[in-house]
Image (cartoon, rainbow, N blue to C red):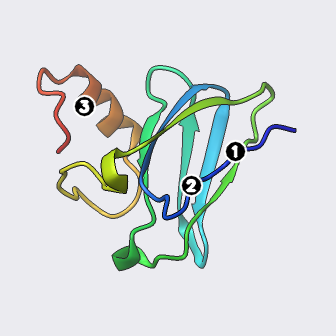
């Protein structure tokens, strides 16, 4: 059973799912969830945002293969500069459209 040592005051982090499948849900909200497939579209930024509820999240790994992830703390634990497009996870169309865009900056 692998484990991770988490430093004090640790919050913002990049997570690159290299393989497998992650399913992320929010407590008290059965309308918002995200399936993250390992590989090309497996990079996310995870942070506990107080304005959105601050209750955290649950991550499950329902795939039939092991899930491997690379977790990298953000500089000073801060989210990178960004604009909120909408509440909830990106749709498949938004992910594909974004990956094909010549402007790969965070929107």
- Which residue bears the numbered disc 2? 7
Residue 71 image point, x, y percent: 53, 37
Pointer 1: residues within 10 angstroms few (<14), some, or many (20+)? Answer: few
- First along the sequence among labels 1 and 3: 1
- Which residue bears the numbered disc 1? 4
Q: Report helix, strand or loop for mark 2.
A: loop
Q: Alpha-carbon distance for marks 1 and 2?
A: 10 Å
Q: Tell me: residue 55, above or below residue 104.
A: below
Residue 18 image point, x, y percent: 57, 23
Q: Tell me: residue 1, above or below residue 67.
A: below
Q: Report helix, strand or loop for mark 3.
A: helix
Q: In this view, does 48 lie to the left or right of 78?
A: right
Q: Is residue 58 left or right of residue 8?
A: right
Q: Alpha-carbon distance for marks 3 and 2?
A: 33 Å
| In this view, the mark in front (3 or 2) | 2
Residue 86 image point, x, y percent: 27, 60
Quadrant in which the C terminus appears: top left
Q: Tell me: residue 58, above or below residue 95.
A: below
Q: Is residue 30 left or right of residue 66?
A: left
Residue 51 image point, x, y percent: 34, 78
Pointer 3: residues within 10 angstroms few (<14), some, or many (20+)? Answer: some
Residue lying at the far front of the rendered structure = 8
**Residue plotted at (18% across, 50% down):** 81
- Which residue bears the numbered disc 3? 98
**Residue plotted at (33% across, 28% down):** 96
Q: Hey, which quadrant is residue 64 in on the image?
A: top right
Q: Is residue 104 left or right of residue 32?
A: left
Pointer 2: residues within 10 angstroms few (<14), some, or many (20+)? Answer: few
Q: Hey, which quadrant is residue 50 in on the image?
A: bottom left
């Amino acid at each position: 059973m692998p484990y991770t040592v988490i430093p004090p005051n640790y919050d913002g982090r990049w997570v690159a799912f290299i393989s497998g499948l992650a399913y992320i849900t929010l407590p008290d909200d059965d309308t918002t969830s995200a399936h993250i497939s390992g590989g090309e579209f497996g990079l996310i930024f995870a942070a506990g945002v107080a304005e959105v509820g601050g209750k955290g999240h649950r991550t499950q790994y329902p795939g039939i293969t092991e899930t491997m992830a690379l977790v990298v703390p953000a500089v000073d634990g801060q989210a990178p500069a960004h604009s909120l497009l909408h509440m909830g996870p990106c749709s498949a169309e938004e992910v594909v459209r974004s990956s094909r865009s010549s402007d790969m900056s965070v929107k």
